[in-house]
Amino acid sequence: MAELTKSQVTQLLQRWSDGEATAIEDLMPLVYDELRQLAKRYLRKERQGHTLETSALVHEAYVRLIDQNRVQWRNRAHFYAISAQTMRRILVDHARSHLYQKRGGGAVKVSLDEALHVGSESPAHLVALDEALERLSAKDQQKCRIVEMRFFGGLTHPEIAEVLEVSLSTVERQWRVARAWLYQALES
C-alpha cells in the first residue's frame, strides 16, 4: 500500500471515530483489497469444501465493523488487527455451527501445530484454538491480542507493537510466552 494511501486510511479512520458517517464509504475502497487478502489467508488454511467464500467473509466482517461505534481507531494497523479479530470470530462461529449441525457438537483435544492450521482438518481444530485463546485472554489479554494479530491478522511484530503501544522487544517476548502457553494448553 502506498504511503499516501496509508495516510489516507489513518485519516479516514479518525474521521470515522469522530462520527463522520461518510468516512466508512470513502475508506472501504482503500482497504477492500487488503481485507480480501486477509480473508484469503484465512480461507486458504480452511478445510476443503468450506462453505464461506472470500467475498462473503469480507462482507460479513464489513457488516460487523460498521456496527462498531465505540472504537477509537488509532491507525491502519489497529484497523487491520480488529478486522482480523472479526474474521476470526466469523470463522469460529461458522465452525461451531458446522460442528453442532454435523456432529452434534463437542470440542476435541488437538495440538497447537494442528490448531494453527486453522481448521485444515476440521472445524474442531479452530474451535479448540479459540477456546484456548479465550483461556489465555482470561489470564493475559495482551498476549491473546498478540497471537490474534500475529497469527490471524498477519501483522508483523513492529505493527503489533505500534497497535499495542509497547516496545518491539515486549511483543517478541510475549509472543514466545503466549505460543508456549498455547502449546501446553492444547496438548493437555
Image (spheres, rainbow, N blue to C red):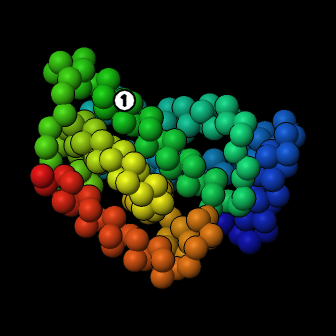
Q: Using the image, determine if residue 27 lies above or below residue 48.
A: below
Label 1 sits on what residue type?
His
Label 1 sits on residue: 94
Image quarter for residue 43?
top left
What is the count of numbered marks?
A: 1
In the image, what residue occupies the spot 30% across and 42% down? 131
Circle 1 crowding by C-alpha within 10 Å: few under 14, some 14–19, many from 20:
some
What percent of the width, then of the height, locates residue 104?
Answer: 18, 18
As drawn, is 23 to the left or to the right of 173?
right
Image quarter for residue 140?
bottom left
Residue closest to the far bottom: 169
Give 170 or 37, whichever is nearer the viewer.
170
In the image, what residue occupies the spot 72% across and 52% down? 73
What percent of the width, then of the height, locates residue 48?
Answer: 24, 38
What percent of the width, then of the height, locates residue 183?
Answer: 21, 61
Looking at the figure, which quarter contains the N terminus?
A: bottom right
Q: Using the image, determine if residue 65 lies above or below residue 113.
A: above
What percent of the width, then of the height, locates residue 170?
Answer: 48, 77
Q: Using the image, determine if residue 97 lies above or below residue 152.
A: above
Q: Is residue 31 among what the camera can see?
A: yes
Q: Give SS at disc 1.
A: helix
Give 40 or 174, whichever is nearer the viewer.
174
In the image, what residue occupies the spot 50% across and 32% down? 56
Q: Is residue 44 among what the camera can see?
A: no
As drawn, is 131 to the left or to the right of 66?
left
Q: Using the image, determine if residue 43 lies above or below residue 50.
A: below
In the image, what residue occupies the spot 73% across and 65% down? 6
